[in-house]
Amino acid sequence: MSLKLDPGTVPRRQRSSICKCFLYSVAIMTIFLFGLGAMTILSSLRDNFIYPHKWMYQNATLEDIKDRSSIVRPLVDRTQTFDIAATVWIREPTSQLENEIEGKETLIPAEVPLFSDIIFRKLSLKDKWASNQVNLRIPTKVFKSRKLSNFDLRATFALIPNSPSLLEYAVSYSTWIPSSIPVPPKRPSEFPLGSSPKQASLENEIIDAYAINVPLISFFPINNRCGAPNGTEESINPVDIDDEDWLMDENTTFSSEKHIPKYKSKGDRWIWDYFEVEVKDGELAEEHPYIISRSHIRVADFTEILNRKAFVGAHKKLRGSSCGQDISDIKASWKKCNRGSYYERGNWETQVKLGIPDESLGKNRTEWAYAPHLSAVSDSAGPWDLIPVPTNHHDCLTNSDPDNIPNVGQDFMDVTWKISYAGRTPPKLLLGNALSSDVYKHQINMTGTEYKKALQQSGTELRHAVHGHWHHEGSHPRRSAALKVTSRFLSFICTLLDILYWYTLMNTVGISIPGALLVSLANCFKYVLMIFDHEKATLVNVLWFAFFNTLWNLPVPVLMLKVALGGSLDRWNGWVPTITVSPPSHRERSSRRTDSRTSWKLMALVYLSFAGLYYFLNPDQIELIPSKGYPNPDPVDRKLVLLLKPFTGSPVVRTGQIFQLLLNYRSSHFAGMYKIRAYLTVATAIMGLGLHMPSTSPFRDGYTLENLLDFVWAAALAWQAATLAGVSQGNDSDDPENE
C-alpha cells in the first residue's frame, strides 16, 4: 500500500487589485461616515424636538440646588392649580380707526369690554379637553366703520394661579415688552365685569404681562353683492384667485377684463401677539368680516429648572429686539409686538423676582421664576365656526341684487363663543404649531358649496385633535386621524411593493396574462383620462398631472403590461435601448395552459355584469353605512371620464382580478403580488371599516358598495396568500424542466 504524499498543484489565490481594494475601502469609509453624520443629525433633530431648549436646562432637581438665585424655576408647576380668565373687547364706534392705526404709532384704540370673567377653574398643566361656552351680545355699530381691523373684536386670556402660589411672593418682574411701549389692556379694572373696580396690584400686573391676545374677526373673500359696475365684468369668484389672496390690500381697482386685486408684501403688515393686524377698507366688495366663534388655548406643560445666566441672556435679547426696537427706520409700537413661536422664545418671555421667607437667614431670600407660556391656535375656526357680520360696506347704487344685500338693521348679534383648553408638552406643542398655520385659514372658501364647507370643517376638526382639542366629546378625532394616516401610509407602501414586484419579476409563471393585460390597460387608460379631464384642464395642470402620474401612478400598469407581453429592456450596440420579446419557457407555457381553462364566455358575462352594475347603480353612491354630516356632493358634469368609467374602469379591473384569483386557485400557488402586500391590503380595508365605528363626531364618510367589493377582494387575496405556496420570481432558464 503506497501513500500519496504529493498533494499535486495547489491553485494559488489570485492577487487582488490594489486599486479595487482602495475603492472598496473608500466606499465603505464613505458609507460609514455618511451613516454616522446622518445619525448625528437625526439625534440632534430628535433632541431639539423633544427638548427644544435643552441648552438652558440646569439638569438638577430643585432640592439639589443650594443657591436658588442661580436658577429660574417655574412659576406654575405640575402641582399648582390655576384659573383661566377671558375678556372680550370691542372697539368704540366713535373711535376712528384710521387715525389710531395710520396716525400715531403708539396710540391705542378706545375699547370697551363685553365680557370678563373666569371661564375655567382649578386647571393644571396636565389637564386636557376642558371646554366652555360663553354667550356674547355683540353690537354691530363698529362694523359699519369705513375701515375695519381683525382686532376690532378681540379676546384676552389670562392664567391666574390659585392660592397658595409663588406669585404671592413676587417682588418685581420683567417682560418681553418694555414698559416704555404702551399696549392695549388685558383685563378691565372691573374684573369680573360688573364688580367693583379693583386696585392695581403687582400680582395682577404680572398676570396681565403674560396674558395673550386673540382676534375674534377674520376676513374672507365674498362675491360682489352689488354686481359689477357698468362696463365691467362680474368680479371674479374667490375660488379662482391665486393662493396668495391673503396678501390682498385694502384697495382694489376694476379692470375692463376682470376685477384685479392689489397686493402688498406680508412684511408691511402689523403683527401683534403672534396674530397679524389686518386692516380692511370698508368699501372693499370682495372681503367680508366674520366673527370667530371658537378659540383653542394651550399652556406649555414645561416645568424644567433653567440656568439663570442662560435665561437672562435670552430674555434680554428678546426684550431688546421686541416690538420693532431692532428696526432703525421705524418707531417701536405695540402693533409690531410679534410674539413668535414657542420654539423661538420658550418660557423666557417673563421673569419674576421672588422674595421667599427664610427663617435661617431671618429675611427673604431671592429666587427667580418664569411665567407659563400661553398660546392660541391660529386656525381655530372652520367654516361652521365663522359667523358673518350683518353689515354692508358698499353702496349698491347700480346693478344691485336685492337678494344679495344682507340685513344691516340688526344692532346686536348673539354669538355662542366656544373655548377649549389643553396643556401640551413642548413636543406636542411644536407638532401642533407645525400643523397650525394661516395657510389653512386662507384656504377656507366661504363662497363655496355646503359640501366643500363640510369637508373643510371635517379637516379642521381632525387637525385640531393634534392640539388636544376635541370639538365634540366622544368624537375620537385622533383615532380617525390615526386610521386615515396609517391607511394612506400602507397604501403608499403597497404601491412601492407593486413597483418592486413587477420590476423584478423575471417570468410569468403564475401570472394570468389576460388578467394582467386587463388591469394594466384599464389603469393606464384611467390615468390618461384623469390628466385631460381635470376640472381646470389648463396647460399647467395637464403638465403637472402628467408628471405626477408618470412618476407614481403609471409605473405599475406599465410594468404589468411589459411582463404580460413578455418584453424586456435591452441595449443594442451597448447603448441604444430596445425591447425584446423572449419565448415562453416550459413552466410559463404550463401556467398559460392552466390559465386558459378559464372560460372567456364566463368572464365576458362577469364583465358585462360589472359594467351594468357600475352604469346603472354606481357602487360609489350606494351607501351600506350612511354618511353623516356631509350634504349631497357637488354636481359634476358627466364628462369623458364619467361616461367611460362604467365600461373601462372598475369593471375591467375587477374582471382582471378574478382572472388572477382563479389561476391562483387552480395552480395552488399565489402570484400577482408579494404576500406581504396582500396582508397590507386587507389591513388597509379593515382600517377603512374602522372609521365607521360609533362616535359623536358629526362627520362620517359613507361605507359604500365599492368599499365592500374592495374588502372582499382584499380578503380573498389575504386568504390565498396565507394558504397557498408562493411562486419563484427568478429566471427559470436554468430549470431542468425547460430543456
Image (cartoon, rainbow, N blue to C red):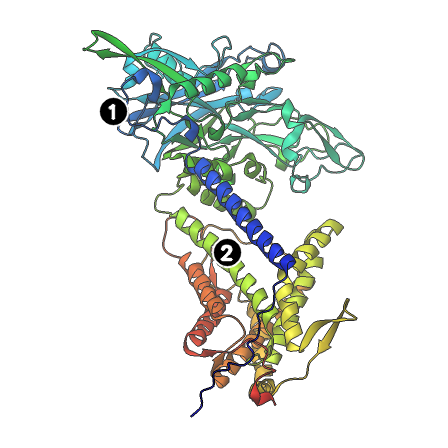
Judge by depth and name the residue closer to the eye, 694 or 73. 73
Q: Quadrant of residue 609?
A: bottom right
Numbered circle sitting on residue 63:
1
Numbered circle sitting on residue 488:
2
Measured from the top left, where is residue 499 in percent x and y?
59, 65
Q: Is 271 on the left or on the right of 640, as rendered?
A: left
Badge 2: residue crowd in 10 Å (few <14, some 14–19, many ≥20) = few
Secondary-structure class at tag 2: helix
Badge 1: residue crowd in 10 Å (few <14, some 14–19, many ≥20) = few
Measured from the top left, where is residue 702 in percent x and y?
47, 58
Residue at the extreme front of the image, as rendered: 2
Measured from the top left, where is residue 47 in percent x and y?
44, 37
Q: Name the quarter where the C terminus is drawn.
A: bottom right
Q: Is 702 on the left or on the right of 270, as rendered?
A: left
Whether residue 75 is situated above or below residue 562 in the rendered picture: above
Residue at the extreme left of the image, as rendered: 359
Numbered circle sitting on residue 259:
none
Q: Is 602 on the left or on the right of 366, as rendered?
A: right
